[in-house]
Amino acid sequence: MDFDFQKEARKGYFKYFSIWFLIVFVLLIATAAAGIRHYRIMQAPRANTAAPSERVYDEANLLTDEEEQSLRDYIAEKEAKYHIDFVVWTFDEPLSDKSSLSDSEWNRLIMNKADDFWDQRQYGYNKGFEGDGSLLADCRYPGQRGEWLSTSGSVYEALSSAEVDSILYDVDEYYDSNPYKAYKAYIDGVCRKMGGGVPGFYYLIALVAAALFTWVYYSSHAKKNAAANTVAVKQYVVGGKPANNTGRDNLLHKNVTKRIIQTSSSGGRSGGGGGGHISSGGAHHGGGGHRH
Amino acid sequence: MFYKCANCGGNVVYNPEKKGMFCPYCDSPDSEQRTEGDKDEMVLCPNCGGELVYDEYTSAFRCAYCDTGLILTPRIDGAYRPKKMIPFQMGKEMCKKALRERFKKNLFAPDDFLSDVRLDGMSGNYVPYWLYEYQTHCDFQGQGRKIRTWVSGNTEYTETSVYDVSRSMDIHFDKIPVDASIAMPNDVMDLVEPFDYKQCVDFDPKFLSGFRAEFYNFSAEEEENRANQKMKASAEKILKESYAGYSSITTTSQHVDIREQHSEYALLPVWHYDYSYNGQDYPFYINGQNGKIVGEAPLSKKKALAYSLTAFGICYALLALVPLLVSFL
Ligand SMILES: [Zn+2]
Ligand SMILES: [Zn+2]
């Protein structure tokens, strides 16, 4: 009679959750270990020392000296945080001597020019070839205006063409009115996509998801489990069916109505393409451009 | 009256698992000897002489002192003698198993809900029932509508046919059970159904030995209304099934005429487990023939909270840690 229900219940509780406690524990250890390793890597000094220290080449003279300096400081801060290089290059020389360029020609020319600029100077946070980083090349030559975002290394891996495009739209916003803001938009855009870590709002979603799961869990186990009526309709009918069963179904009248069916068709949706290619230097690049 | 063992003098009881009379003291089967006590109202236990306490309608019970299964002879004789009965098919152990199986997913039930200590307190009751028989003639008149649609080319056709519908049938209902016990809630007893009458036998007091029993608290006339309702509901459903092919139907007339009716008194087996928790009662009724359970599982708030919070914690930890771990790799 001296059965200890409390103790038994505690034992039952731990037994019930044991496998989950173990999984969470292992996950916690693994995450902590990975976190420490990640922290050490982020603390390590820049590996690529071949690249020039200059990040802002304002050959088209769009920025004031203060703006240039401010941009350099901003880039230095972001490079230290994200471990990727940012380069801004403006120029107003023509991409080609041809008087009128088709869009595809413009794309190809500015892409090559940007990639070569990056490759020749051996930019990239971790190494000088296919290193991590991105370059914004801004051509201001009349009739050939537009910017190209060239991606390399981890940035190339991480950014889809659609994401490159969305960053360029942010740049376009200030392209004419305020180039300084436009280039900042490029840096911020890349940082956002390279965000590293898990965005804050994810934890909020996870919280809601966990709450939802808990609700389902609770209600599935808290069911009262009430009994249902299991008496069949003919439970007490002798022989299981009525006797002398007769019936009549006489058709009185019938009528038919017509309706014309309206048909409609729905349009398709096409998918986007990738931005991957190999530069003249043999390096893999990604990216995209917006011509103005 | 009680059954004494011819071999050892112990109390012989009916044992559902062994399907017969059994002496638990010397393990003998069918060794019972009917031993009369007072012919009239029993006041003292014929076995131990202890003073007996029982209710107004009780006809069988156990002595509070010596646990002997006693049967009050005047309450099973004459007008009180049941015509039929279904002996218990499920013993206490089978019942415990059925309860544990049924509520094993109720994680938040209090710790002792399905414990032996509590479950041993359940009692097997022979509940007085009136079983009604009805010879009926049922008919239905109405107008039915059948709708058929099809498509040809770019045109949809809808054909509506209207029928004059009539049905006529004799339905013979037998042994519609209605409990005649005040102690048993009607709605619960309706859910304890159905009983399988193939195991219905002529009344024999032996089957009461070791169990509790009551004689009817109401007459067959007083309870007839409930049987009548059950019969009508069933007849109407059978009629409805007979014209099920129509998309819609309007009733012109419908009759369920009783041509003949009859009732008989029977005892049907029901186990009763009373669990109380935090000042609230949770009664459970179990069909003593097939183990069907009627009753709602209790919930321990403390346990529900502990388990739910832990589940929440684990779920959130998984959702939060996995992406974090991936982002570090
Ligand atoms: Zn014996
Ligand atoms: Zn006694």
Image (cartoon, coloured by chain):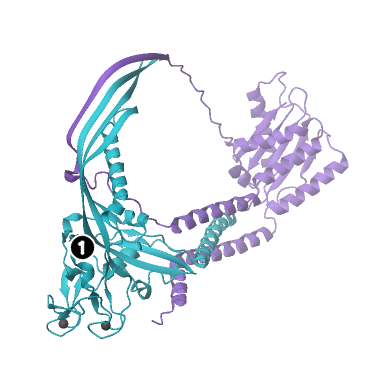
Question: Is residue B28 placed above or below B162 in the rendered structure?
Answer: below
Residue placed furthest toward the right: A65
Tell me if residue A144 can be seen. Answer: yes
Check mark 1 vs ligand 2: CB closer than 8 Å? yes or no: no
Tell me if residue B247 can be seen. Answer: no
Instruction: Name the residue rendered at 55%, 61% in the picture.
Output: B313
The amino acid beneath tag 1 is: Ala
Instruction: Name the residue rendered at 29%, 49% in the picture.
Output: B227
**Figure quadrant of residue B295:** bottom left
Where's residue B140, x and y in %? 27, 31
Local crowd at mark 1 within 10 Å, few (<14), some, or many (≥20)? few
Q: Chain of mark 1?
A: B
- Is label 1 in a helix, a strand or a loop? helix
Question: Chain in cyan?
Answer: B
Report whether B151 appears left or right of A292.
Answer: left
Image quadrant in which the C terminus of chain A is located: top right
Where's residue B139, x and y in %? 25, 32
Question: Is residue A43 placed above or below A169 in the rendered structure?
Answer: below
Question: Chain in purple?
Answer: A
In depth, the one of B296 and B106 nearer the eye is B296
Report whether B11 appears left or right of A14.
Answer: left
Where's residue B18, x and y in %? 17, 70
Ligand 2: image quarter: bottom left
Image quadrant in which the N terminus of chain A is located: bottom left
- The residue at which mark 1 appears reads as B79
